[in-house]
Image (tube, rainbow, N blue to C red):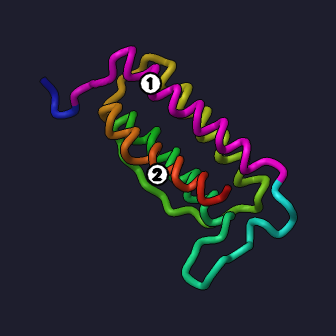
Amino acid sequence: MSAIEETGSGADRRWLRHSVATLAYRGGKVLRGAPPGFAEFRLSETTRTPGEILAHLGDLLEWALSMARGDRAWHDSAALPWDAGVERFFASLAAFDAYLASGAPLVAPAEKLFQGPIADALTHVGQIA
């Protein structure tokens, strides 16, 4: 067996894809139609702005895809203008879902993909709400 073992049954992939769809639904509810200036709102000096949280969401989803592929690349991106950040969020979701749907090797265990980037992303969508 190789050092990187392929994991991910069909049931695991369906469950992950359902989680990604849930994230897309919940994200769509809170990200679309944000009022002007929302991206820059800061509750206190130590909190992230919604724009910074949105950038982190994109990073998490790109990390999930890299984990699934086996290269585990993390990036800490700066906030984009709100609409561009929303586009990045949905594009990252679509890319991860397309990989899950493709049948390509799922290197990271489905449980780790959910426990790490997906669960974290669900939490941050809730923060924006």
Amino acid type, residue under disc 2 in the picture: Asp
Identify which residue, 39 or 126, lies in the foreground.
126
Query: In screen coordinates, is 41 left or right of 60?
Result: right
In the foreground, 113 or 81? 113
- Specify the quadrant of the image occupied by residue 52: bottom right
Seen from the viewer's position, the closer of residues 101 and 24 is: 24
**In front of the other: 109 or 11:** 11
Q: Hey, which residue is sitting farthest bottom in the picture?
A: 45
Q: Which mark, residue 48?
A: none
Image spot of residue 73 (x, y percent)? 41, 50
Q: Does the magenta stretch include residue 120?
A: no
Q: Main secondary structure of the magenta part?
A: helix
**Label 1 sits on residue:** 15
Residue at 22 percent of width and 28 percent of height: 5
Quadrant location of the C terminus?
A: bottom right
Q: Mark 2 points at which residue?
A: 120
